[in-house]
Each structure stands twice: as structure tokens, then as C-alpha cells.
């Protein structure tokens, strides 16, 4: 038997926790587990009130179920883990753990679902609830548990799910759920004498002010460097937990596909969901992205005509804000994991954002391109490949034909209401899908270049007009010296002028000229 098959057979003995989030199940069933208990021990030493924002499927639920087992004193589950000989197993705490991903708020409504969850928790601890109002039930449960069993630990997982679920679907319901959650959390500060620790996770931070306004002692761990690796898988964790796997897999390629997330510019982590799926299948695919990218996010990006998020400048305060009544796309993309830091200056409240890795970049560009482009015979990727080939071969008749195919099925209303920026966005996304080095809206001393495309042996400068003329576009390239910065690159320089016609719904004219 060859070496690869032997390795494959050994690999089958390892159990990968694909889609599993419960710590006890993973340990008792001998699934692969990445030990995060040092972070948890550091977090729990002094108690307190904590909030952590991380993207979906990044290990937040695993974190809360691990904390629950620890506070409940389930020592047998922590054999061999960092915390085993560092925790006082003689002391246990009652735990109120609520996962908003598990409660049935869609059918029963959020308030009724929360009441049911609290009453069920009371039954688990033999606590009889007599109150009927949500906040009063929560307060009563905490006080009675504390009186009978000691200080209470409150763990809230996916706190924003009842809001995010309704984004772009039912804003009124999202706002109603926000009010319910504010009422729910309002009792935590006054319940401090009865609480050991409060730990709240979610994807977004946008609800922090409005929901937790009464909880002003809530410490935000999201960009705290001490806990930058509490979710996700670091490089050291990868190499120490997947020794056999890395003997046959390409570490550099795995890193390109699934690494790249950072919240402090000191610690970088792999997407755990994608990494575990990769080792389970040993195929490079878009696991995390395919597991549930919200249509609302794509539609919002398209509606705001946003398409170029590489090296995006922002402020830290802006990334922490989110107005449900007026959603900003960049904070949403950062909080949901589609963008991450590439530069970070806390003193100046500034940062630079980019796609974290190849999985996210390729998937997001393709999905967004397909949202712009509606063609029954060709996906955006197929059309992009054809356009690349035409440009490489300098076949400009094909360039015109392919661009027309890109736009041929755009709705009539778009042609009537959109300006050239909309068509520019589609071309930009089409090129970026192939990984072509393309720069959009490049600023120069004389103006703003619509598009610069770099190939190994040539550089294209594209100028776009709407209901004007392609010759006017070429004149602009020449007169404003758009090629001047590239004159000494040793590459062929080709100018392309494109004029779109609203009436004909197509490229009316395309002209090109070899500048050098």
C-alpha cells in the first residue's frame, strides 16, 4: 500500500467536529479539540461582565459550552487540558446559559421564547418561577439560584441572532426584538450581588449601546490583545494539533485559503469551521462562506454600489457602530468576518481593512458579481475568464461582445436609473474574480482613472463613459496623462475607451490605442 493510502487510513481514525459546538459531546466522543482553556481561565479569574464579537462559526458556542462545563465542575471532561490542575473543582456555580440560535423566536416570538427558556432552566435547578414579566422572571431566577446554590454565571450565546435574522426581511420585527432584548438585559446590573460572571457573545457590536445601555460595566474583549486567539485556530495550534495532516498537506496553501483573521494585528487565526472541514475532506473549498452568507449582506452591498473593499480605510469607532435604522456596509462586513484588519492604529483611531483570505475574497466577489450579473448561460466566473483571454490576446471585438453579455440582462430600471459608476462596478468585480491586479478609481494629479489592469507584459487603462463617446474617453486618457506613472514599467500600454448606451442597453462603442 502506498504512503498516501496508509496516511488516509490513519486519518480516518481521527474524528473532526464538523458542525459540532458542544464541548461535552466533543470530549466524550473523542473528537479533535483545540484547547482554549488557558484563555478561559484568564477570563474567569476575577469574574466580571464581558462581551465578545466574532463571526459566525468561529467557536463562540464552543467557548460558552466549555465555560458552562467548567463552572459546573465537570472535571472529567478537562483531563489533559491546560486548566485541569489550575481550577478549584470543589466549588461549582449554577449556570444560566442561553443560546439565541437555539430558541424558537421565529415561530413563538422572542419574548415568549425567552420566558420559556428561563422557566425550563428554573425547572432544571428545581426553582419555581412565579413572575410573568420577562425581566422579572430573569431577576427571580438569578436571585433564587444564588440563594440556593451560590453566585450565578450567565452565558449568552449569539445575542444578536433575533436581530440579524430579520435584517433586510422585516426591519420592524428586528426593532421589536431589540426592545425585548433591552428589557431582558436591563436587570443584570442590579443583579450584580448575585452574579459570579456574565459573558455575552455575538456577531455584531451594533446593538451594544441600545441593548446594553443599562450595563455600562460590560467590558468589550473584541479587540483586546489578551484574548485575540480565544476563537479561531492560531498557527501554533494548527501545527501542534494537526501534525500528521500537515505531513501531506501544503501549509502555505492552507494559510492562503483559511488564515488571515486578526483583531489586534499581533495574533492571526484560521477560520476553525473551514479548517476542520478541510481536514475532513482534504479539498480546498469555500466551507465557511457556503454555510450561510446572508442574502441581505450581498443585496446591501449592491444597493450601496459598494464593490471595492481592498485596503479600505476606516476608523475604529465607526467599525464599532451600527445603526439598525441606517445600516453601514463596512462595519457589518467587518463584524460578520468578510473584512479584517491589515493595519491598526489604536492611538489614531484608524485602521485598514481587507478580505482575510482567498476563501472569503473569491466567494464574496463571485456572489456579488452574480448579484449584479444575470445571465442564464454564463456565470460571472465564466465571463471573467473569457474577458481575460480576450484582453491577453488583444481581441477587442471579443472584449466588446463579452462586456455586452455581462450587461445584456440588466433590468430596464437599472439602465434608466444608474450612472456609469454602476457599470464600472461590474467590470471591476469581473476582473477581480480572476485575481487580476486591477485598480479602480485611481487618483492622479489630473483626475481619477476609472480602471487600470495589470498583466505580465501589458497594462490597460480603461475609461468609461455613458451616452457620450469612446473617443472622448480615449482623449481623456491621453490629455490627463493617465499612463505617466507606468511609462517606465517596460510593459505595453494600451488605452481603452468604452461608451455605454442606455437606449441600446449595450456597449455602443469601444476604441483602443497602443500608447507605447
Image (cartoon, rainbow, N blue to C red):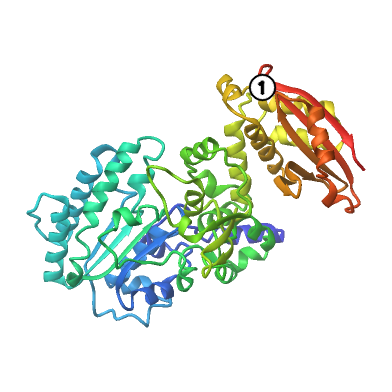
**Residue found at x 43% / y 75%:** 38
Q: Can residue 262 be seen in this view?
A: no
Q: Position of residue 473 (x, y in %)?
A: 78, 32
**Residue found at x 62% / y 63%:** 245
Q: Position of residue 176 (x, y in %)?
A: 27, 42
Q: In which quarter of the image is the N terminus?
A: bottom right
Which of the 4 image quarters holds residue 165?
Answer: top left
Which residue, given by chain and number where applicable, does mark 1 sit on? 408
Asked if 474 appears above or below 502 in the picture, the reply is below
Q: Is residue 37 visible?
A: yes
Q: Where is residue 134 in the image (x, y as percent from the top left)?
A: 16, 51
Which of the 4 image quarters holds residue 8?
Answer: bottom right
Q: Position of residue 135 (x, y in %)?
A: 17, 54
Farthest top residue in view: 503
Asked if 232 appears above or below 180 in the picture, the reply is below
The residue nearer to you, when weighing 87 against 499, is 499
**Residue found at x 71% / y 25%:** 500
Amino acid at each position: 500500500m502506498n504512503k498516501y493510502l496508509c496516511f488516509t487510513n490513519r486519518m480516518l481514525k481521527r474524528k473532526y467536529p464538523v458542525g459540532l459546538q458542544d464541548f461535552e459531546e466533543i470530549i466524550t466522543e473523542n473528537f479533535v479539540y483545540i484547547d482554549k482553556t488557558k484563555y478561559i481561565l484568564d477570563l474567569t479569574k476575577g469574574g466580571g461582565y464581558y462581551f465578545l464579537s466574532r463571526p459566525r462559526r468561529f467557536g463562540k458556542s464552543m467557548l460558552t459550552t466549555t465555560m458552562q462545563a467548567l463552572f459546573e465542575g465537570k472535571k472529567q471532561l478537562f483531563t489533559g487540558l491546560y486548566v485541569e490542575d489550575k481550577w478549584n473543582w470543589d466549588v461549582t456555580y449554577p449556570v444560566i446559559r442561553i443560546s439565541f440560535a437555539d430558541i424558537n423566536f421565529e415561530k413563538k416570538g422572542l419574548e415568549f421564547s425567552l420566558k420559556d427558556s428561563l422557566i425550563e432552566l428554573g425547572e432544571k435547578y428545581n426553582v419555581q418561577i412565579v413572575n410573568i414579566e420577562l425581566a422579572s422572571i430573569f431577576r427571580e431566577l438569578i436571585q433564587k439560584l444564588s440563594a440556593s446554590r451560590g453566585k450565578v454565571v450567565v452565558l449568552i450565546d449569539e445575542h444578536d441572532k433575533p436581530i440579524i435574522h430579520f435584517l433586510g426581511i422585516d426591519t420592524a420585527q428586528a426593532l421589536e426584538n431589540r426592545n425585548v432584548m433591552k428589557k431582558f438585559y436591563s436587570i443584570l446590573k442590579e443583579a450584580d450581588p448575585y452574579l459570579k460572571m456574565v459573558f455575552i457573545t455575538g456577531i455584531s457590536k451594533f446593538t451594544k449601546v441600545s441593548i446594553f445601555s443599562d450595563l455600562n460595566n460590560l467590558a468589550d474583549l473584541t479587540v483586546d490583545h489578551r484574548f485575540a486567539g480565544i476563537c479561531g485556530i492560531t498557527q501554533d495550534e494548527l501545527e501542534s494539533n494537526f501534525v500528521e495532516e500537515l505531513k501531506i498537506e501544503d501549509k502555505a496553501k492552507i494559510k492562503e485559503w483559511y488564515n488571515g483573521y486578526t483583531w489586534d494585528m499581533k495574533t492571526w487565526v484560521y477560520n476553525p469551521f473551514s479548517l476542520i472541514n478541510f481536514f475532513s475532506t482534504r479539498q480546498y473549498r469555500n466551507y465557511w462562506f457556503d454555510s450561510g452568507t446572508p442574502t441581505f449582506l450581498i443585496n446591501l452591498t449592491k444597493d450601496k454600489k459598494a464593490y471595492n473593499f481592498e485596503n479600505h480605510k476606516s476608523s475604529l469607532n465607526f467599525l464599532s457602530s451600527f445603526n439598525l435604522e441606517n445600516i453601514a456596509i463596512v462595519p457589518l462586513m467587518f463584524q460578520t468576518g468578510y473584512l479584517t484588519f491589515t493595519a491598526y492604529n489604536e492611538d489614531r483611531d484608524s485602521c485598514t481593512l481587507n478580505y482575510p483570505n482567498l476563501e472569503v475574497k473569491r466567494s464574496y466577489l463571485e456572489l456579488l458579481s452574480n448579484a449584479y450579473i444575470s445571465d442564464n448561460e454564463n456565470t460571472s466566473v465564466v465571463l471573467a475568464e473569457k474577458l481575460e483571454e480576450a484582453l491577453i490576446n488583444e481581441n477587442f471585438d471579443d472584449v466588446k461582445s463579452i462586456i455586452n453579455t455581462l450587461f445584456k440582462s440588466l433590468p430596464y430600471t437599472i439602465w434608466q436609473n444608474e450612472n456609469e459608476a454602476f457599470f464600472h462596478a461590474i467590470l471591476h468585480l469581473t476582473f477581480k474574480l480572476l485575481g487580476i491586479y486591477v485598480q479602480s478609481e485611481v487618483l492622479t494629479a489630473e483626475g481619477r482613472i476609472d480602471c487600470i489592469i495589470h498583466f505580465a507584459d501589458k497594462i490597460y487603462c480603461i475609461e468609461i463613459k455613458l451616452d457620450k463617446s469612446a473617443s472622448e474617453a480615449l482623449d481623456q486618457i491621453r490629455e490627463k496623462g493617465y499612463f505617466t506613472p507606468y511609462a517606465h514599467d517596460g510593459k505595453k500600454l494600451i488605452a481603452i475607451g468604452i461608451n455605454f448606451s442606455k437606449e441600446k442597453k449595450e456597449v455602443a462603442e469601444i476604441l483602443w490605442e497602443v500608447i507605447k
